[in-house]
Amino acid sequence: MATLVVDNVSCASCRYIVEQTLPAMADVRRVEVPFKTKTAAVLFDDAATSVAAMAEATIQSGYPSKGTQ
């Protein structure tokens, strides 16, 4: 499990985009993005992907993030 601090998440649509972006990655199993806290809790297989790769995916979707794992 990792936590990403996600910039620019300010509404339900923003949350939806992040929640659709991360599960498209290999072995991301669950994503929860409460837009009020501007974070994403991500359950993933760290042998298949990394926090850095997930942060890059959110950047590509317009929501820069950084991992706090």
Image (tube, helix red, strand yellow):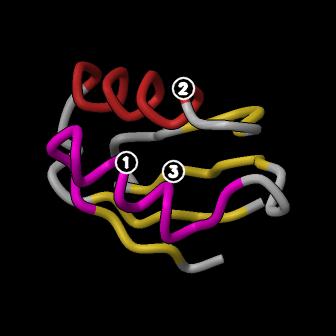
Residue 44 in the image: state x and y as whole percent: 77, 48
Q: Residue at point 50% right, 74% down? A: 67
Q: Is label 2 in contact with label 1 (beta carbons under 8 Å)? A: yes
Q: Which mark is residue 24?
A: 2
Q: Which residue is mark 3?
A: 40
Q: Determine if the magenta segment contains residue 62.
A: yes
Q: Nearer the viewer, mark 2 or mark 3?
A: 2
Q: Which residue is mark 1?
A: 57
8 on left or right of 67: left
Q: Within 10 angstroms of label 3, few (less than 14), some, or many (20 or more) residues?
A: many
- Give the amino acid at mark 1: Ala
Q: Pick whichever of labels 1 and 3 is earlier in the sequence.
A: 3
- Foreground residue among 60 and 16: 60
Q: Quadrant of the C terminus?
A: bottom right
Label 2 sits on a secondary structure element that is helix
Q: Pick whichever of labels 2 and 3 is earlier in the sequence.
A: 2
Q: Which residues are magenta?
A: 49-64
Q: Is residue 27 above or below residue 63?
A: above
63 on left or right of 53: left
